[in-house]
Image (cartoon, helix red, strand yellow):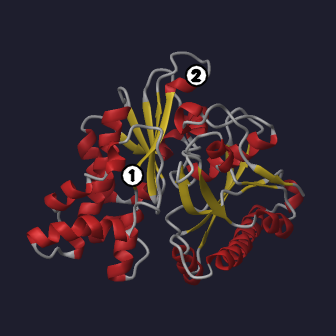
């Protein structure tokens, strides 16, 4: 898994022999700075971008292959021991419904080359079929959350805070039987770490704000927070999804410029603090608007390590406990990688995995393209 934060590649080795998936080994390989910069440049139209996309896609496949090789070495396993690699790829555009009503999503990473390099079957391109069926192509992980995190008595919200924040709402099952799809809700609530990462990169040349330390040195700018929360995306009802196509520094400048003209210049650390507020408040507002009674909240993704963000969110939630997904047996850093391993397994088994009530597709579909070895 390599997500919108563009920090690196998460590799999870998962076994599905038991009822619950077992996480056997994990590995993280950071993006080289040059590759990260090249992928960031592709987030918007650039000169000769078709050629650039193809070549960067090859470079990503090589990096994915290296990450897999390193994990297998640590685990003392051979490629022949692995059933398949489920590779999400790197999203560079996500525009469901755009222009012709169908739109598109684009994840790059040359799955054919990855299969050649690894000598393992690769499953990729998980989102396109759902979009072709009228869906958002996202989020796809609620079905996995349903399989591993649903509880009989408690209504749970699983919040993944990567570059984008997304919410899965799992109503209490009430029995040992599987939940009907209508008991699961999932959607993107807005920016997670994406804006804060871009802001600190611009001002301190750091990739992210560790523990929210820099933002903690600032304070909330109420006028800026109010302006940012006017973004129409926040008011949309699910199904909905988003990405860098909307939430980027240009978007931030659009709202902050009018505020600075009225209130004067803003300190960068105060803007950073306000961006943390934005993530927490947009998550909380989405829970309040679209989810029924919530008994517990569990966090996963890189944002779960931002102590300021966690503190802000817990403050908004009040008595509702907010814990990392580690409390449910899966580390916050590995939920998404495990989810795509599960999606790959389901594809090979010809099982549908998209929840139409979540993505808005016209019906359940088998997701993924297979490159056989």
Residue 193 vs 167, above or below: the answer is below
Circle 2 SS class: loop
Q: Position of residue 87 (x, y in %)?
A: 70, 57
Between 99 and 206, the one nearer to me in the picture: 99
For image coordinates 23% across by 72% down, the residue present is 269
Badge 1 crowding class, 10 Å Cα cut-off, few under 14, some 14 to 19, many 20 or more, is many
Q: Say if residue 217 shows up in the picture.
A: no
- Residue where numbered disc 1 is placed: 190
- Is 271 left, or right, of 176 in this rendering? left
Between 171 and 212, the one nearer to me in the picture: 171
Residue 68 vs 291, above or below: the answer is below
Q: Quadrant of the N terminus?
A: bottom right
Q: Quadrant of the C terminus?
A: bottom right
Q: Position of residue 193 (x, y in %)?
A: 40, 61
Q: Position of residue 148 (x, y in %)?
A: 59, 35
For image coordinates 32% across by 49% down, the residue present is 232
- The tag earlier along the polypeptide, 1 or 2, is 2
Residue 116 vs 37, above or below: the answer is above
Q: Position of residue 333 (x, y in %)?
A: 53, 55
Exactly how many numbered labels are in the figure?
2
- Residue where numbered disc 2 is placed: 180
- Is 252 left, or right, of 43 in this rendering? left
For image coordinates 26% across by 35% down, the residue present is 319
Which dot, 1 or 2, sits closer to the camera?
Answer: 1
Q: CA distance from mark 1 to mark 2?
A: 26 Å
Circle 1 SS class: strand
- Is 252 left, or right, of 63 in this rendering? left
Q: Quadrant of residue 147?
A: top right
């Amino acid at each position: 898994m390599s997500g919108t934060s563009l920090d690196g590649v998460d590799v999870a080795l998962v076994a599905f022999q038991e009822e619950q998936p077992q996480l056997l080994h994990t590995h993280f390989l950071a993006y080289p700075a040059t590759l990260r910069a090249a992928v960031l440049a592709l987030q918007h139209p650039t000169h000769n971008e078709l050629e650039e996309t193809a070549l960067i896609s090859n470079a990503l496949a090589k990096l994915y292959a290296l990450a897999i090789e390193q994990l297998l070495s640590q685990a003392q396993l051979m490629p022949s021991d692995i059933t398949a690699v489920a590779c999400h790829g790197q999203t560079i555009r996500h525009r469901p419904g755009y222009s012709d009503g169908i739109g598109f999503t684009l994840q790059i990473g040359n799955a054919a080359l990855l299969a050649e390099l690894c000598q393992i079957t690769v499953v990729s391109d998980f989102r396109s079929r759902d979009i072709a069926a009228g869906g958002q192509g996202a989020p796809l992980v609620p079905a996995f959350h349903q399989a591993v995190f649903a509880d009989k008595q408690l209504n749970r919200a699983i919040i993944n805070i990567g570059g984008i924040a997304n919410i899965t709402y799992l109503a209490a099952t009430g029995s040992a039987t599987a939940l009907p799809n209508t008991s699961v809700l999932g959607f993107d609530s807005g920016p997670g770490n994406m804006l804060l990462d871009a802001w600190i990169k611009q001002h301190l040349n750091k990739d992210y704000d560790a523990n929210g330390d820099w933002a903690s040195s600032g304070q909330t700018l109420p006028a800026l927070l109010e302006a940012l929360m006017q973004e129409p995306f926040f008011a949309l009802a699910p199904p909905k999804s988003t990405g860098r196509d909307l939430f980027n520094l240009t978007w931030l400048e659009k709202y902050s410029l009018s505020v600075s003209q009225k209130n004067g210049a803003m300190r960068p650390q105060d803007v950073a603090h306000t961006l943390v507020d934005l993530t927490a408040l947009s998550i909380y507002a989405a829970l309040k608007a679209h989810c029924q009674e919530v008994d517990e909240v569990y966090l996963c993704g890189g944002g779960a390590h931002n102590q300021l963000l966690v503190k802000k969110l817990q403050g908004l939630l009040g008595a509702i406990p907010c814990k990392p997904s580690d409390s449910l047996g899966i580390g916050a850093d590995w939920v998404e990688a495990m989810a795509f391993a599960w999606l790959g397994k389901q594809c090979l088994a010809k099982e549908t995995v998209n929840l139409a009530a979540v993505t808005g597709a016209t019906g359940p579909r088998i997701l993924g393209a297979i490159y056989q070895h």
